[in-house]
Image: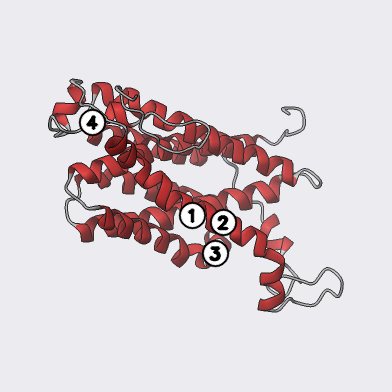
Amino acid sequence: MFSKIRDRNIWTIYAAILLLGIAYGISIALIAHHLDLRGFTKPDMGSLASWFALGIVSFSLPMGGLIRRLSAKTTLVLSLSGYAASVTLFPGLTSFTAIAADRFMDGACSVGIWISCETILLVRAPRGMKAFVTTIYAMAVAIGYVVGPLAAEQIARFASIHQAFLVSGGLAALSALLVVLRLDPDDGTAEHAHEGAHDGAALDPDTGAPLGFGPLLDRIKTSCFGTFAYGYFQASVVLFLPLYLMESRGATPSSSPASSRSGCSSSRTSPGATATATATSGSCACWPSSAP
């Protein structure tokens, strides 16, 4: 694998997205528990997930133009920095409006990260290896999602939930710094790749004419469904699984120092007990210490 991918810029993206994946995993593992401790209801949490999704939807299309204007590297650094700020501020926010705005920013920055990373990888990957390069990218993200919740459990044993979010923000900031220091500036290849392609419009491979909306949607319907399914999984299973397990599996309180510092009462499960991940699902499954 190392001999096939010789461009160090690709490995820089892998390292950055691995750090970010761990940051994602830590925050995802604790968001529902944190909101529950703050007294937010499940409908409130569902609404907050919608604000996150709205950030993704709102900035998906504009992000392509932003990359062309600023460069993929600059967009990636700004998005990583924005996510770092978002996750760092999150535990200190108390009102629904402030948290909704923060979640919207989280979604907007996240989609900027994804599009920037994939743009850089596809431009720099050798012809015939683009699928392989993006597969390794997906693996790096997945590893981060597994390691992050496991790390959150250990952090929460000795620190508060607030401090765990600070660790997540620090990892995202470190990822941005890595990109600043190690990723080469864009070489213009992405811009040249679109020259003469009807301003980037999708083309029919048989006729070379631009595809209309209907034919384009027909060609990408499988990808669209997969993306929708993943988004629904994130907004429902990942968000509510910790609370479901706490309520249904007889979770018991823990006497860890993090419990008292985060405001857990004796009827709550400590963050440490609720941050253990199910590696097979990539979610933040909370396995209580007294699970039957």
Q: Residue at x 47, y 65 (%)?
A: 57
Name above or below for residue 69 compared with residue 237: below
* Left or right: 215 in relation to 63: right
Quadrant position of the C terminus in the picture: top left
Q: Residue at x 40, y 35 (%)?
A: 285
User: Where residue 269 is drawn, which disc sits there?
Assistant: 4
Residue 201 in view: no
The residue that disc 1 covers is 231
Disc 2: CA contacts within 10 A as few (<14), some (14-19) or many (>=20): few
Q: Nearer the viewer, mark 3 or mark 1?
A: 1
The residue that disc 2 covers is 227
Q: Nearer the viewer, mark 1 or mark 4?
A: 4
Name above or below for residue 234 compared with residue 192: above
Disc 4: CA contacts within 10 A as few (<14), some (14-19) or many (>=20): many
Contact check, label 2 and label 1, Cβ < 8 Å: yes
Q: Amino acid at mark 1?
A: Gly
Residue 61 in view: yes
Give the mark nearer the N terminus: 2 vs 3. Answer: 3
Specify the quadrant of the image occupied by residue 34: top left
Q: Position of residue 191 (x, y in %)?
A: 67, 62
